[in-house]
Image: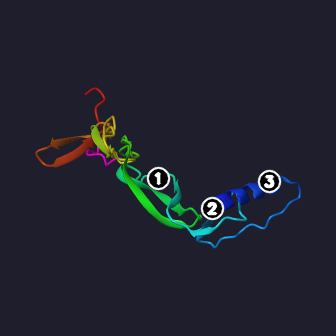
Amino acid sequence: MWMNIKRVLIHLISCLMCIKDFQIDAISCGPDEHLVYPQYPVIGTCEPCTGTRDSSIGPWSQCSVTYGDGSRSRITMYTSRCGSIIRQTTETTPCHQPRCPAVNGAWSSWGQFTPCDKSCGGGIQVRFRTCTNPSPSTGGQPCIGDSLQTASCNTQLCPKLVTLTNPTASVLITLPPDPAS
């Protein structure tokens, strides 16, 4: 019998709601309750919220590393039928970023030449540079070319020493270089 009365009341209320400007005060539930018959708020009842109404999956985070193997995560929020957060879970998955990029080597500036190894007659001086601007790394190519450079120096002819001997005296004379020799 109660079911028949309930059906009649529901029908009557829905008919009244169709009449223009007819207002019905709705039942309001507490924050942790929900309305059982929301389409008929006058005769609805409030019940405690149980179970999950919805879940919201967040976006994946950035990978935890710039290069190599790392991890990323995302959060899923579960809400009750009343909208309050019931729980949240964090899901983690591995991620891989490409290895560090290869860096090719490049030469530093040339150093100063060393002093000439001879004072005349053609000497050699050297200077150096290093492959450190930057140094090759992570499979990058080494610098191309030489790290040592030589140059000729003091190319003028050396003067000749001539010793003249006389039975009474000995003289040492330095003559300019002979261009023909």
Q: Please state the horizontal and vertical placement of residue 22, each as a whole percent of the image.
A: 86, 60
- Asked if the magenta segment contains residue 118, the reply would be yes
Label 3, on which residue? 15
Give the quarter of the figure containing the C terminus.
top left
Label 1, on which residue? 62
Lower position in the chain sequence, tag 2 or tag 3: 2
Give the quarter of the figure containing the N terminus.
bottom right
- What distance separates the C-alpha of mark 1 from that of mark 3? 56 Å
Callouts 1 and 3 close, C-beta under 8 Å? no
Residue type (three-letter) at the residue carrying disc 2: Met
Label 2, on which residue? 1
49 over 71 or under it: above or below: below
The magenta region covers 112-120
Q: Please state the horizontal and vertical placement of residue 15, each as a whole percent of the image.
A: 80, 53
Residue name at image x 50 percent, y 66 percent: 86
Residue type (three-letter) at the residue carrying disc 3: Cys
Residue name at image x 62 percent, y 69 percent: 46
Which one is in front, 20 or 116?
Answer: 20
Q: Which type of secondary structure does the marked residue at label 1 adopt?
A: loop
Nearer the observer, disc 2 or disc 3?
2
| Color style of the picture | rainbow
Residue name at image x 74 percent, y 54 percent: 11
- Asked if the magenta segment contains residue 147, the reply would be no
